[in-house]
Image: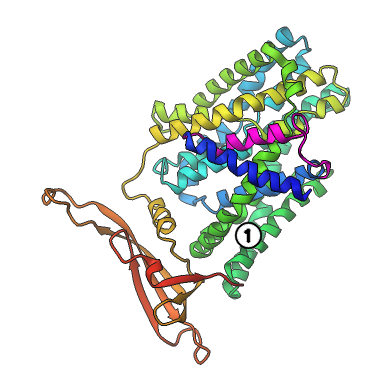
Amino acid sequence: MAMSIALIILLGLSGDYLFRRFKLPGLVGMLLVGVFIGPYVLNLMAPEMMAVSGDFRKIALIVILLRAGFELRRDTLNRVGRAAITMSAVPAVFEIVGVTLVAPRLLGMTYLEAAILGAILGAVSPAVVVPLMIDFMDRGRGTKKGIPTLILGASSVDDVFVIVLFTVFLGMYGGGEVNLWARLAEIPLSIVLGIIAGLIPGYILYRLFTKYDWRPPKRTIVVMGIAIFLTWLEGALEPWVPVASLLGVMAVGFVILEKSEPIAHIISQKLKKLWMFAELLLFVLVGAQVNIQVAWKAGLAGIAVITVGLLFRSVGTYISLFGTNLTWKEKLFCVVAYIPKATVQAAIGAVPLAAGVASGEVILAVAVLSILLTAPVGAIGIMILGDRILDREEQSSYLFNELRKRLGLPRVGESLRNKDFDTVWKVIEEKETWIEAPPKAGEENVHPRPLPAISLRYWKEETTNGPGTGKTLTCRYSQMDTPFDNHWEILYDW
């Protein structure tokens, strides 16, 4: 299995690099690497690796959903709340209806089997969508209207809604008694319980982090442990009550961000570094699940069914955005952002076949084909349209994130070493401010441009004094000031 991990790292990074060189999403390169080194093409992956692939993919998905939670602000959620609710259900219903109408004629299956297929195809992939939305948020694109947050929230609930419908249709096929209204009631119940399951430990973690001065890596590991536990809890409680654990994972980050933004940003930065490895695992292993031979069997008829389903879905997405302040171009971006499919299709595509559904093999083939077609096309479309359509606020708060990243600034709670005097300091306060850029030559009469600046207050750590006493120092950092690493370096310890 060690060799399989080495292949994932080396070939995955190579695929990521090559696609980025051509201005394409790196995740597409990683997906294709997974397809070729997986058991269905070159078979370079060890069987043990494929056996634990599901757990690795779940952990990687947890990392990116935690990052999403640490970026969700209450004011933005309030602005996009109604649209997020409609987008979490209406597009999926439209796609299921579209597939149900055309699949019986094109694929020779019953209407109920077509509905099962539609439910599988109806889920958008958070693994593809969430990283791209976080990237836009980091760069301040579309944040004025909360478009990335809208898609983040809607895509997470979309999966819960679709999986419940899938279990309803599969239960109806088995001939068992299915209480439709009770099943549908599971959707809001699982959402509410999932959020509560995340808010409670999130608040407890916030109190622990403010009471005990744990180093950033330890805080991050504790948050990861809680998030993994929540996903285990969903499986443990499944026979009795539904819990949308992935929403709970995002809620953990949300409540910590609400209570203490500095702590949330420190953990988010550590998760961002962890995501570099988790991203490789997620997309390469998702690609490895794709069976090219099975997808080939779907043929042109399968492509036609997927296309019709996406057309119906696009109409549903556009209708969901009626009444919002989005322009038609921004609505088009949301339509494209709801195209990618990968994680849910890889997870449940083979379930009908195992359950004895007559068209189970055809359903699996179309599900696999949908990953091959929509994940790359959707990711490329999101990246291209996002950069062209999404606005960028002149004074967006996300510009501070960009400044921190560019200058490599520390967060509150982190320890530093002064390179000039070899002394140890600790960041105890940070302030985000806007300053005026000096006018360029010939622009003396032009209104000055606002520039983001971050002021950090340092406390000199000494054994002879405690917090609240001793020397402090305040430094400001912007594009015009002395670079941080000229005089300081961050100490990474526990």
Please determine whether, in this image, residue 87 is positioned above or below residue 473: above
The answer to whether residue 49 shows anywhere in this view is yes
Q: Which residues are magenta?
A: 23-48
Give the residue at the far top of this rendering: 105
- Relative to 229, residue 91 above or below: above
> Which kind of residue does numbered mark 1 sit on?
Gly
Q: Residue at x 57, y 71 (%)?
A: 210
Q: Residue at point 41% right, 36% down?
A: 387
Query: Where is residue 172 drawn, in percent x and y?
Result: 82, 23
Residue 493 position by quadrant: bottom right
Closer to the camera in the image, 341 or 8: 8
- Residue 174 x/y as whole percent: 87, 24
Q: Residue 409: give x, y in percent of width and height.
A: 43, 64
Q: Residue at x 51, y 28 (%)?
A: 336
Question: From the viewer's perspective, is residue 187 above or below residue 367?
Answer: below
Whether residue 193 is visible: no
Quarter of the figure that contains the C terminus: bottom right
Q: Is residue 238 left or right of residue 427?
A: right
Q: Position of residue 411 (x, y in %)?
A: 47, 66
Q: Which residue is mark 1?
A: 202
Q: Quadrant of residue 99?
A: top right
Q: Nearer the viewer, residue 272 or 157?
A: 272
Residue 213 among those drawn in magenta: no
Name the foreground residue: 396 vs 424: 424
